[in-house]
Amino acid sequence: MSVIADFAVPPEDFVLSHAVCNGPDVTVGIERVVQTESSLTPYFQVAGDALEEFERYVDDDETVTNVRTLERVDDERFYRGDWTEDVDHLVRGIHEAEATVTHARTGGEVWDLRMVFPTRDALSAFDDHCDEEYDYSLKQVFDRSNTATFGDFEMTAEQRGTLLTALEMGYFEVPRDATMEDLADEFGITVQSVSQRMRRAHANLLQNTLALETTESDDAD
């Protein structure tokens, strides 16, 4: 049975350490991580009022390379890059544990990190691998099947409600009967906040349906 573990990781011990520790006050979130045999490619979002300045710190950050801007939306930007050998020990630990990073977010003080491990033994092996190298704390561990904690497909109630409301209002129709602005008005929040909820809900849904089926099919082969 796979398990989900939440970690608190100091910013100096994780990717983008230089930019997060020394750059301006922004919020950084890793939306997803593409994993290959030899590397991890994070897709990350940065939100704040000093994005140009933050990018200069990213350019000097030795934990990530080949950073490219994918999208610019008001006070948000979306990037992709490659983790470098400076975090090679962590990358090896993730590979060896066959773990998946599903969530990582920081406002500068600490990274809140969530990872999925195929078994508790894999989590234990990862903990042993990284314990001497990194100063982090394991906050909590849950069985993946615990829908009382995670909700269906690991979506929060807020994310699930947003998707269902979007469906009911015709956001997914072609052509659309509702816009992102309509959803923002419905919930009384900004368009940016609705967009973030939708992206995270879609990511959780896909990771726990199509992506999970692909993994199980590969294991069967």
Image (cartoon, grey):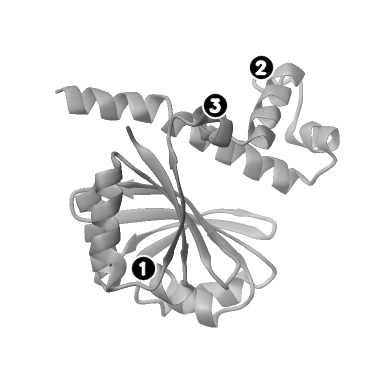
Of the two numbered discs 3 and 2 in the rendering, the one whose residue sits closer to the viewer: 3
Residue at (70, 69) in percent of width and height: 49
Amino acid type, callout 2: Glu
The quarter holding residue 185 reads top right
Q: Nearer the viewer, residue 101 or 82?
A: 101
Q: Nearer the viewer, residue 143 or 60?
A: 143
For the residues bearing labels 1 and 2, Cβ distance under 8 angstroms? no
Say whether disc 3 or disc 2 marks the residue closer to the N-terminus: 3
Q: Secondary structure at mark 1?
A: strand
Residue 194: image location, x then y, percent = 71, 41
Question: Where does label 3 land, which residue?
Answer: 152
Q: CA distance from mark 1 to mark 2?
A: 39 Å
Which of labels 1 and 3 is toward the front?
3
| Amino acid type for the residue under numbered disc 1 | Val
Q: Earlier in the sequence, mark 1 or mark 2?
A: 1
Tell which circle, 1 or 3, labels the residue nearer the N-terminal end.
1
Q: Which residue is mark 1?
A: 64
Quarter of the figure with the N terminus: top left
In the rendered image, the residue lying farthest to the left is: 221
Residue designated by label 2: 173
Q: Quadrant of residue 98?
A: top left
Residue 105's disc number: none
